[in-house]
Image (tube, helix red, strand yellow):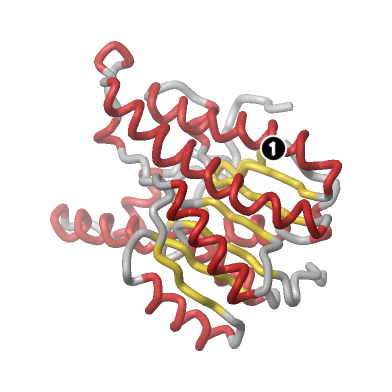
Amino acid sequence: MDLQLNGKRAIVSGGSKGIGLEIARALTREGADVALSARGAEVAEVAAQLASESGRRVIGVQVDTGDDASVHAMVARVVAELGGVDILVNTAATPWSPDKNVPTIETSDELMRGEFEIKVLGYLRTARATAPHMVEQGWGRIINISGLGARSAGSAAQTVRNVAVSAITKNLADELGPQGVNVTVVHPGLTRTPALTARLAERAAAEGTTVDALEAALVRNSIHRIVDASEVADVVAFLASPRSIAITGDAIAVGGGVPGPIYY
């Protein structure tokens, strides 16, 4: 299937590693030009590597999504260098880890504020800065990467940040839909990334086992294997394309299926 992404211009926030980088790679594979935005200076080198690998225009822009001025400066540079912006994929958030799980009555204000500031407001800032460009041209796609923590209890901070991203997504979808802009939220579950593999390799060496064995012990989904970041990226690439016109405001789970519950 031709996703009709050739020549489209995308921003992938948090695009220098992990799921974000795989999404950027998938978009370039489909013919899009991409701006990788991230806090660290390494984003320029990662962008150069992806440009060489893909043959597409890829630029790296440092940004602090916690600062509105920094976000607007990033978008202005992307528009100037790529000629506009058609697609925004938000992935810039601190990964959730089990050590952050605490009982709700022990959850600090600082933890809640931090998660809201980085993920929820960070996503909102980038959407606010890019949406006017999409509305002006009458077409655009915004995809927010959230998480399956939105659908289960276990950590108030994790649940709140992911549910809040879903709420922002739905509001944007209803407001921007008449102007040709679709907005969706994608919920990964446990996903294989280089960071996860490195952690498991370290643990495997310490415990005298294998990464495959540790992965198998972690699996709780319907397909009985961990979803790879590249497989999440394939779904996002479709949502970023003109062919996804019928999907907006909805949450797409990409965790390999949750046994038991029925979502409708």
* Number of numbered discs: 1
Q: Is 157 drawn above or below residue 90 in the view shown? A: above
Residue 114 % position (x, y): 33, 34
Q: Residue at x 83, y 50 (%)?
A: 180
Residue 59 % position (x, y): 51, 76
Q: Hey, which residue is sitting farthest left in the picture?
A: 206
Q: Is 77 drawn above or below residue 188 in the view shown? A: below
Q: Residue at x 76, y 61 (%)?
A: 241
Q: Residue at x 86, y 42 (%)?
A: 178
Relative to 12, is 193 on the left or the right? left
Relative to 162, is 206 on the left or the right? left
Question: Which of the two residues, 91 or 29, is positioned nearer the viewer here?
Answer: 91
Relative to 67, is 233 on the left or the right? right
Question: Which residue carries the number 1 mark?
Answer: 172
Quarter of the rendering containing residue 80? bottom right
Quarter of the rendering containing residue 212? bottom left
Q: Residues within 10 Å of mark 1 (few under 14, many from 20)?
A: many
Image quarter in which the C terminus is found: top right
Question: Which of the two residues, 76 or 33, is positioned nearer the viewer here?
Answer: 76
Q: Residue at x 46, y 76 (%)?
A: 47
Badge 1 amino acid: Leu
Q: Is 110 drawn above or below residue 91 in the view shown? A: above
- Mark 1 falls on what kind of element? helix
Quarter of the rendering containing residue 174? top right
Image quarter in which the N terminus is found: bottom right
Residue 129 % position (x, y): 59, 50
Residue 200 % position (x, y): 28, 55
Relative to 236, is 116 on the left or the right? left
